[in-house]
C-alpha cells in the first residue's frame, strides 16, 4: 500500500496536475470544527454555566488538543450566537490589542503630509473584547465611534475567545482587569473625542480564555475568573470524539477493530519516553491517514497493517527524530507480539 500522490521515483513530469484532496479552508465545513460534535462532560458544562451565571470570564486550561479552543465555538453554538470573536494572543500582545488596533503610523503620516483622512476614527479597528462591547450596543448609541468600514450588526451578544493567554507578557492579564470587571474601555487615541464605551447590560460579552498553564497568570486575574481544567480524554471519550469526526471508523463492531487497537496503541504512548505527547488533533490525523491513504479496514486491528504502512504514518504523531525512532520501536514490538 502507498500514498496516491508521489512515488518519489518518477522520471517524467505528468502531463496533467495530480489531483490533491480538496482544501477545507472554511473550518465551518470541517467536521472537526462542527460544534455539534464537541463532547462536553458534566463538570465542564457546570463550569460554563457558573461563569454565565456570575457573568465572569471562564479560564480553561489543559494540554494541547483537549478542546480548549473549540469549547468557545460550542458555547456560542449552544447559546444560539454567531461564531466567537477570536483573539490569538502573541508574546508581544498588550491589553489594548484585545480591544482595538490603532494605525498610529498611518495617522502620523496623514497629519504630516496633509494627505488622506484627518479623522482619528478612520485609523481605528475594533477587535476581540472591544468589538464585542461595541456590537452589544444599538447602532445609534455608538454610531459616532464607528470607523467607516465597520459593519455594526448589533445589538447582539457575542462569545469572545482569547486564545493562549499564557503566551502574553505577565502584565497583560492585569492590565485588562478593569475592562473585564466593568466591561468598558476607552480609546485614548481619539483625543478630544475620547469616550468610554460600555457593554449593553442586556448583551454583555461571554469571555472565554484558554491557557496551557495557569502558573504564569497573576493572582488578581485568577480571582476574577471561573476556572476549569480539561483533563486528557480517556478511551471512552476518544471513541466518542472519533465517532463524531470520523464516523465510518466505527462502522465495525467495537472489539478487535482498527479504532479499538489504534486507541490502545495511542494511549500506551504515555508510557513511552517521548519529548512531547501527540494531541487529539494528531491522533485524528493519524487515523485519517491510515484510512484515507491506506484504506485500512475498520474491522481489522492495527496489527493487521504492514509495519511499513505504520512507519510511513509516524510523522502525524511524532515530531522529532528521537520520537519517531521510539514509536518505530513500539510498533515493531507490537507486531512481533501479535505474530
Image (cartoon, rainbow, N blue to C red):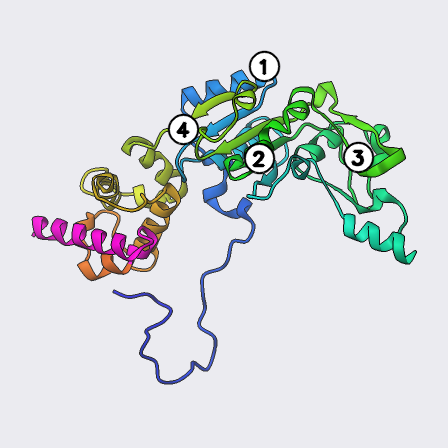
Task: Determine if the magenta segment contains residue 319.
Answer: yes
Q: Position of residue 53 (x, y in %)?
A: 58, 14
Q: Residues within 10 Å of mark 2 (few under 14, many from 20)?
A: many
Query: Magenta residues: mostly which secondary structure?
Result: helix
Q: Which residue is mark 1?
A: 54
Q: Earlier in the sequence, mark 4 or mark 1?
A: 1
- Mark 4 vs 2, N-terminal side: 2
**What SS does tag 3 mark?**
helix
Numbered circle sitting on residue 162: 2
**Residues tagged 3 and 2 counted as in contact (Cβ below 8 A):** no
| Of callouts 4 and 3, the N-terminal one | 3
**Which residue ends up furthest to the right in the rendered image?**
114
* Lateral position of residue 176 relative to residue 42, left or right: right
For the residues labelled 3 and 1, the Cα–Cα distance comes to 30 Å
Q: Helix or strand or loop: what does disc 4 sit on?
A: loop
For the record, the magenta segment spans: 313-339
In the rendered structure, find residue 188 and report the number of the disc placed on it.
Answer: 3
Q: Is residue 204 magenta?
A: no
* Mark drawn on residue 129: none
* Chain-order first, disc 2 or disc 1: 1
Q: Residue furthest bottom?
A: 12
Mark 3 or mark 2: whose residue is earlier in sequence = 2
The quadrant where residue 163 appears: top right
Report the mark closest to the observer, 4 or 3: 3
Amino acid at each position: 500500500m502507498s500514498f496516491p500522490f508521489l512515488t518519489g521515483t518518477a522520471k517524467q513530469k505528468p502531463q496533467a496536475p495530480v489531483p490533491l484532496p480538496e482544501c477545507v479552508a472554511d473550518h465551518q465545513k470541517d467536521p472537526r470544527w462542527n460544534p455539534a460534535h464537541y463532547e462536553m462532560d458534566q463538570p465542564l458544562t457546570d463550569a460554563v454555566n457558573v461563569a454565565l451565571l456570575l457573568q465572569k470570564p471562564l479560564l480553561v486550561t489543559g494540554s494541547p488538543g483537549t478542546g480548549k479552543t473549540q469549547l468557545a465555538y460550542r458555547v456560542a453554538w449552544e447559546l444560539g450566537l454567531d461564531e466567537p470573536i477570536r483573539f490569538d494572543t502573541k508574546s508581544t500582545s498588550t491589553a489594548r490589542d484585545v480591544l482595538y488596533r490603532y494605525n498610529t503610523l498611518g495617522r502620523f503620516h496623514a497629519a504630516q503630509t496633509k494627505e488622506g483622512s484627518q479623522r482619528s476614527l478612520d485609523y481605528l479597528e475594533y477587535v476581540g473584547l472591544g468589538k464585542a462591547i461595541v456590537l452589544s450596543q444599538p447602532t445609534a448609541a455608538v454610531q459616532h465611534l464607528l470607523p467607516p468600514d465597520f459593519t455594526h450588526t448589533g445589538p447582539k451578544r457575542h462569545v469572545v475567545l482569547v486564545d493562549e493567554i499564557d503566551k502574553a507578557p505577565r502584565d497583560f492579564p492585569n492590565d485588562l482587569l478593569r475592562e473585564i470587571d466593568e466591561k468598558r474601555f476607552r480609546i485614548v487615541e481619539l483625543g478630544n473625542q475620547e469616550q468610554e464605551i460600555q457593554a449593553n447590560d442586556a448583551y454583555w460579552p461571554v469571555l472565554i480564555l484558554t491557557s496551557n498553564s495557569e502558573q504564569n497568570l497573576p493572582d488578581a486575574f485568577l480571582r476574577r475568573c471561573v476556572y476549569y481544567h480539561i483533563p486528557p480524554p480517556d478511551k471512552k471519550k476518544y471513541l466518542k470524539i472519533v465517532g463524531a469526526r470520523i464516523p465510518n471508523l466505527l462502522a465495525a463492531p467495537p472489539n478487535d477493530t482498527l479504532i479499538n487497537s489504534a486507541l490502545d496503541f495511542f494511549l500506551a504512548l504515555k508510557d513511552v519516553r517521548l519529548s512531547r505527547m501527540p494531541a487529539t488533533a494528531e491522533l485524528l490525523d493519524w487515523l485519517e491517514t491510515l484510512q484515507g491513504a491506506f484504506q485500512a479496514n475498520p474491522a481489522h486491528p492495527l496489527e493487521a497493517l504492514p509495519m511499513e504502512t505504520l512507519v510511513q504514518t509516524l510523522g502525524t504523531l511524532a515530531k522529532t527524530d528521537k520520537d519517531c525512532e521510539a514509536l518505530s520501536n513500539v510498533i515493531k514490538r507490537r507486531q512481533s507480539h501479535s505474530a
